[in-house]
Amino acid sequence: MSTFMRRLVFASTLVLAACARTPQPVVQAPAVQPAYVHRGVLGLTSSELVARLGNPALQVREGVGLKMQFRSRFCVLDAYLYPPESGQGLTRVTHSDARLLNGADTDQAGCISQIEAAR
């Protein structure tokens, strides 16, 4: 192959390479934050629960724990408060359950909103 042909092939390769699309890096859009993020009840003390949800419909001592029950016209929220493992400090909500009046499980955030609105 002559020098001219080699240069022609090389130049053609460069031209074709320049015309080829280079892959663009994939840029992910930032996660959209919802305008309203519902705050749950985990970690709240009994006085914080009362301040937020009103007086409980039922309050039961269970050993070292405390169960506080809050109700709306549509649902029931049970909040279970226990002291820290060290035994020192305030009891705080470590677990909560929400259910409809017929006993079926329901969304806790929705139930909390209903209880707050009923205050």
Image: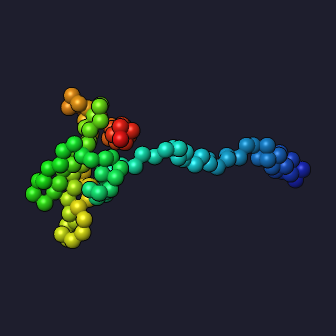
Residue 69 drawn at (x, y percent): 22, 44
43 shown above or below 119: below
43 shown above or below 105: below
Residue 59 appears in the picture as rendered: yes
Relative to the observer, which residue lies in front, 52 or 86? 52
Relative to the observer, which residue lies in front, 1 or 67? 67
Q: How is the image coloured?
A: rainbow
Q: Is residue 106 left or right of residue 82?
A: right
Q: Residue furthest top?
A: 102
At x 31% / y 47%, what residue is drawn?
Answer: 54
Q: Quadrant of residue 93?
A: bottom left
Residue 57 drawn at (x, y percent): 22, 42
Q: Is residue 8 left or right of residue 45?
A: right
| Number of marks drawn | 0
Residue 97 drawn at (x, y percent): 25, 43
Residue 6 drawn at (x, y percent): 83, 50
Which quadrant is home to the C terminus? top left
